[in-house]
Image (tube, helix red, strand yellow):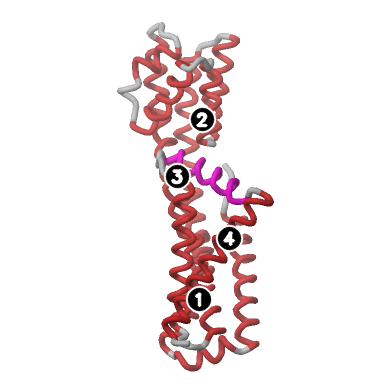
Amino acid sequence: MSVPLLLVLVFISVSALTFYSTRLLTSKVSYEQLAADKLQKDLSQIYAFVPPENIISLTIILSSVLFLVGFLLADTNVVAGIILGLSMSAFGLFIPHMVTSYLIRKRLEKLNEELPGTLEILGSSLRAGLTLQQAITRNIERMPQMSAQEFNIVLYECRLGKSLTEAMDNFAARTGLMDVKLIAIASELALKHGGNLAETYHNLSKLIRERDIFHKEVNALTTEGKMQAVIMTILPFAIIVLMTLIRRGEMLEFLASPIGISSVLLVFVMQVIAYIWINKIVNIDI
């Protein structure tokens, strides 16, 4: 059998195995549906109206292509090719998740920065005698972009028949931000039991600004640790690929040996443990 035909068969086999394994898990424990629901929730946070199935398919294709590239580096050494392919295909599994997580984090950070100004705008209207829903409706065009998007959803849910407190609770659940939860709780207490909501929003505005400053200081202190977690996790596999390009013969022989296979598996397990461990240390819940 010719080498190109062998490579094509390997690529088709890996793609088919990945696809049907996912389908098998779907039929038993609905793993794919759970992943799609989680991805749909993440995409909705950045207003990316893309079917989650497309992202999952893209992930599978990207992983398969990277596996084929790694397999090609090994020429006819099948064992070394599989190890290189698996090392490279791991990146394909994590790249879409990393990109989505980055976009979500940036959007939520921007929303959190806009909240103090938004509360000041609403507080001014509340002091003028408007109700909270009227204040949101009147000032929706004056709000910053991210806040305007979220409060538009709040107004839309109110038009569908939900109460304002329910819509605010959904706002808090949708973003998962502690500051939004504080706003929702304060709004609910004022709407149900009365109180000076304008003054409450003014105090919350100052509190959110102080929390945001403190959060940025903590992020500045933990950024180095987070980058170390990412770099140190990627580095061993990048070295494997780089050394294969530099010293092809020796590396292929090493990767095909029992010691090479055991070493790669051991490194993979240790890197996963180290990544989780470092993230537990540097991720501080404020």
Disc 1 residue type (three-letter): Val
Residue 265 lies, in percent from the top left, at 63, 76
Q: Earlier in the sequence, mark 3 or mark 1?
A: 1
Question: What residue is disc 2 on?
Answer: 180
Could you tell which of marks 3 and 2 lies nearer the N-terminus?
3
Judged by depth in the image, the label closer to the viewer, 3 or 2, is 3
Q: Which residue is mark 3?
A: 51
**Residue at the spot 51% in from the left edge and 55% down from the top edge:** 222
Q: Amino acid at mark 4?
A: Tyr
Label 1: which residue?
10
Dividing the image into 4 quarters, which one contains the C terminus? top right
**Closest to the observer, 172 or 10:** 10
Image location of residue 91, percent across then percent down: 48, 66
Secondary structure at badge 1 equals helix
Which residue has dot 4 on it?
20
Magenta range is 31-46
> Is residue 99 highlighted in magenta?
no
Q: In front: 161, or 204?
A: 161
